Image (cartoon, rainbow, N blue to C red):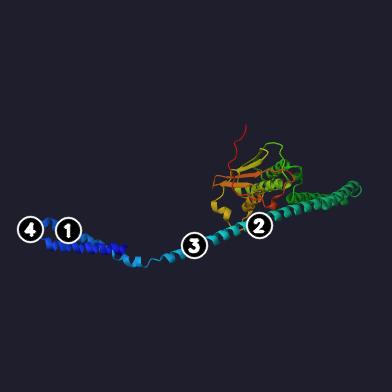
Amino acid sequence: MFLAFAVFYVICGVMHFVEIGTEWHPAGWSGAIIKAVAAVMAVAAAAVLWPLIPVMLQLPSRKSMHEVIAQLEGEIVERRSAEEALRQSQAILRELAAYQEKIREDERKRIAREIHDDLGQNLLALRLDVSILHARTSERHPNLNEKIGAALGHIDTTMKSVRAIINNLRPAVLDLGLHAAIEWQVNEFRRLSSIECELTMDHHGATLDDMQATAIFRVLQESLTNIRRHACATSVSIDMRTDGRQLWMVITDNGVGMYPNDRRKAHRFGLVGMAERIGMLGGELRIDSAPGEGTVLHLSIPMRAHGVPDVATGMGGDAVIAPLPARQT
């Protein structure tokens, strides 16, 4: 196409120059000037278009274009297949993570129960025997009584340690329900940190299965631990609400906040673990934070009745939360 235009302009220019030579006389000087200008412009346009001719000649043929299109279509199909395989792999990994989390919680529960039933009971029996011995030696053997009293103190310390280990594995109060477990955890947080913590929970009466209750409790436990260790906060508020179908929890602190890159630092999987734990339940989690402005954690999970298959069957969600419903007064 460009070649045709260039040849056309060259021919037009030559024809104009011929007309100028044949029609040049005093009466037609103005027309000759106009034709001369047109001829120069035609030749200039041809000169500009002439370098494009080799480029046009190097353009691929229609057959080559069809081959390139077919290759691109094949690459698109391969990419879609790879994306589908990646999604399936992520789903399998999420199911595996859910299964492992369930096994770990079951193992924690079993170990805590065995420690309570065996070691705890044995320590309690030992303390009763030592207490009796301590009472009977108070008058006749004061030196022995003093040593028995020291041993009794060691037994009490050991029993406190055992209770702490059991609570770290799985608090017994969690068997009484999520509300009781959250109240216990908040009281422990107040005792250990001396940070003001406001707790607001509705009592809708809806119940959660053990997997959901444990996941929510663990997220709360991890959040409060992070606040106590890193946030330098002076005030924390926890708000949990339900409507029978959905459960929402918001944890807010007035601490130092987080920088955007803090969540991606190596070997820091606490926040990722919380998001995955909620995602495995089909829930959503979002963390809003900025340096010096504190941190707000939003959590939302769908509630389901007892007996519904657990998350190991593949229920999943994203770590993004939908807007919270308006608070009812």
Secondary element under disc 1, as helix, strand or loop, is helix
Q: Position of residue 65 (x, y in %)?
A: 43, 64
Query: Does residue 236 sit above or below 28 in this rendering?
Result: above
Front-lying residue, 200 or 284: 284
**Identity, as a three-letter code, of the amino acid under mark 4:** Pro
* Cα distance between the residues tagged 4 and 2: 94 Å
Is mark 1 in CB contact (under 8 Å) with mark 2? no
Is mark 2 in CB contact (under 8 Å) with mark 3? no
Secondary element under disc 2, as helix, strand or loop, is helix
**Which label's residue is closer to the chain start, 1 or 4?**
4
- Give the number of the disc on residue 214: none
**Which label's residue is closer to the chain start, 4 or 2?**
4
Residue occupying the point 19% across, 61% down:
39
State the quadrant of the N terminus. bottom left
At label 1, counting other C-alpha atoms closer than 10 Å, the crowd grade (few under 14, some 14-19, many 20 or more) is some
Tag 2 residue: 92
* Cα distance between the residues tagged 1 and 4: 15 Å
Q: Nearer the viewer, mark 1 or mark 2?
A: 1
**Which label's residue is closer to the chain start, 3 or 4?**
4
At label 3, counting other C-alpha atoms closer than 10 Å, the crowd grade (few under 14, some 14-19, many 20 or more) is few
Secondary element under disc 3, as helix, strand or loop, is helix
**Identity, as a three-letter code, of the amino acid under mark 3:** Leu
Horizontally, residue 164 falls left or right of residue 195, namely right
Quadrant of the image occupied by residue 190? top right
Horizontally, residue 241 falls left or right of residue 163, namely left
Q: Which residue lies furthest to the top in this view?
A: 329
Tag 3 residue: 72
Q: Position of residue 17 (x, y in %)?
A: 17, 63
Tag 1 residue: 35
Tag 4 residue: 26
**Which label's residue is closer to the chain start, 1 or 2?**
1
